[in-house]
Image (cartoon, rainbow, N blue to C red):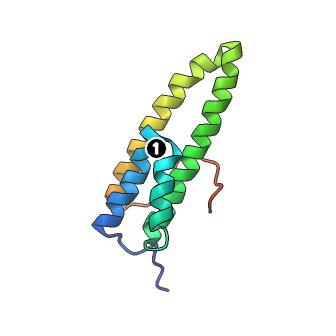
Amino acid sequence: MNDPVAQTPSNDDRNLAMLAHLLGIVSGFIGALIIWLIKKDQSAFIDEQGKEALNFQITMLIAFVAAGILMLVLIGALLMPLLLIANLVFCILAALAVSKGEHYRYPFAIRLLK
């Protein structure tokens, strides 16, 4: 079968997918959402990686809200820096993978968009 996801993505597709992952560091899910909404119908690679970036950033948002609530009992103060570091590291790993044309899946993310 001719699976469009299995094809090698173009440089533009790889760059936009990389940007979708990296924007999560500074904009949360907003950057990935914008790229995904604009390009999802034009590229299977951007559709897949945009959803992956969105799922991870939504998962991180939920984790940050939970850590914020847990600040009341001081556990959140320990979780916040760990979440920031995890977000940074996993977004960079994802960006590096998609820049090579690889399909990246975050090790932990709630799969809301499939």
**From this viewpoint, is residue 105 visible?**
no
Placement of the C terminus among the 4 image quadrants = bottom right
Q: Residue at x 46, y 71 (%)?
A: 44
**From this viewpoint, is residue 60 visible?**
yes
* Residue under numbered circle 1: 24
Front residue (pair 40, 109): 40
> Number of callouts in the render?
1
**Amino acid type, mark 1:** Gly
Callout 1: few (<14), some (14-19), or many (20+) C-alpha neighbours within 10 Å?
many
Above or below 6: residue 98: above
Farthest residue to the top: give it: 74
Q: Is residue 79 left or right of residue 100?
A: right
Point out residue 20 in the picture as x, y percentages from the top left corner: 42, 53
Q: Residue at x 64, y 54 (%)?
A: 111
Point out residue 110 in the picture as x, y percentages from the top left corner: 64, 49
Q: Residue at x 60, y 45 (%)?
A: 58
Q: Give the image quarter of residue 9.
A: bottom left
| Secondary-structure class at tag 1 | helix
Front residue (pair 58, 109): 58
Farthest residue to the left: give it: 11
Front residue (pair 103, 30): 30
Above or below 86: residue 10: below
Point out residue 2 in the picture as x, y percentages from the top left corner: 46, 84
Q: Residue at x 46, y 41 (%)?
A: 27
Above or below 14: residue 82: above
